[in-house]
Amino acid sequence: MTLRKLVAGNWKMHGLSSDLAEIEAIAEASRGYPQVDVALCVPAILIERASRAVPGFAIGGQDVHHAEKGAHTGCVSAQMLVDAGAALTIVGHSERRDAQREQDSEVKAKAEAALAAGLDVILCVGEILEVREQRAAVETVLAQLDGSLPEQSATGVELAVAYEPVWAIGTGKIPTTAEIAEMHAAIRDRLAGSYGPAGETVRILYGGSVKASNAREIFAVAHVDGALVGGASLRAADFMPIVAAASVDR
Ligand code: 13P
């Protein structure tokens, strides 16, 4: 089954009021690619201004707390993201799994809270270099999936999975297309095993050093249904060629 491609930018800890013009430029240029879904996940504090600046364009968060509300200093709930105008959120990014010591069970709770609040979710998984070198990447990523996938596939909201090898993030290194194909096929199988036919429609994004120069090759791999883009999503000039590559029929 060929799914529509989703190209999502993860701005990480980048983005000030002065960058709203760049978000507007990306939203405007994305209208030229109606066959591709495009989204930008920006710092929480920028979501409201960004979503007001580009009505109808998907603005998302980068993390969410699993609880509805309560004594969680510094945290943001799913309902707050929705209230600010977010349409989606990332959960389980490796930078949070690492720096904030997020475990699979917490990532799962975050994904479930976000879906329940009406947000689409991009759930990230990926192995560190040592694991890849030990040839244990597939089993490690499948174990992460088993621990962090929400109980049920979503209805009315969308779950996507992003495979982001940790060693490929921000390094300029990417797996071979054969390695990406092997991992995405394994993830597809596991999604079908977990959700039945609905698992066939969960988009599987690749993330890690996606750029204009490698996007076409990556999008041509079976079961690559889009990309989660970090550094190259900060400027329309770098990001739009990736969106354009996703729009090419194969
Ligand atoms: P880069 O595209 O900068 O490697 O980042 C990938 C990423 O972590 C997206 O979530």
Image: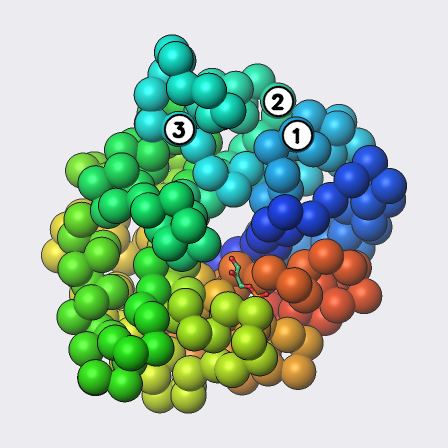
Please name the amino acid that badge 2 sits on: Ala
3D distance between C-alphas at marks 2 and 1: 9 Å
Query: Mark 1 or mark 2, which is nearer the start of the sequence?
Result: 1
Residue at 57% in and 38% down: 60
Residue at 77% in and 52% down: 26
3D distance between C-alphas at marks 3 and 1: 15 Å
Residue at 63% in and 42% down: 42
Q: Residue 152 at x, y = what percent?
A: 21, 37
Q: Residue furthest top?
A: 70
Task: Determine which quarter of the picture holds residue 193.
Answer: bottom left
Query: Mark 1 or mark 3, which is nearer the start of the sequence?
Result: 1
Nearest the eye: 180 or 133:
133
Question: Are the residues at dot 3 and dot 1 in contact (C-beta closer than 8 Å)?
Answer: no
Q: Secondary structure at mark 2?
A: helix
Residue 10 visible in this rendered orientation of the protein: yes
Q: Residue 177 at x, y = what percent?
A: 42, 86
- Circle 3 packing at 10 Å, graded few (<14), some (14-19), many (20+), is many
Where on the image, by quarter, is ligand 1? Answer: bottom right
Residue identifier under label 2? 84
- Left or right for 100, reference 213: left
- Left or right for 114, reference 55: left
Residue at 63% in and 39% down: 43
Q: Nearer the viewer, mark 2 or mark 3?
A: 3
Q: Residue 8 at x, y = what percent?
A: 57, 54
Please name the amino acid that badge 3 sits on: His
- Circle 2 packing at 10 Å, graded few (<14), some (14-19), many (20+), is many
Nearest the eye: 161 or 132:
132
Query: Mark 3 or mark 2, which is nearer the start of the sequence?
Result: 3
- Left or right for 12, reference 93: right
Residue identifier under label 3? 65
Q: Which mark identifies residue 45?
A: 1
Quadrant showing the N terminus:
bottom left
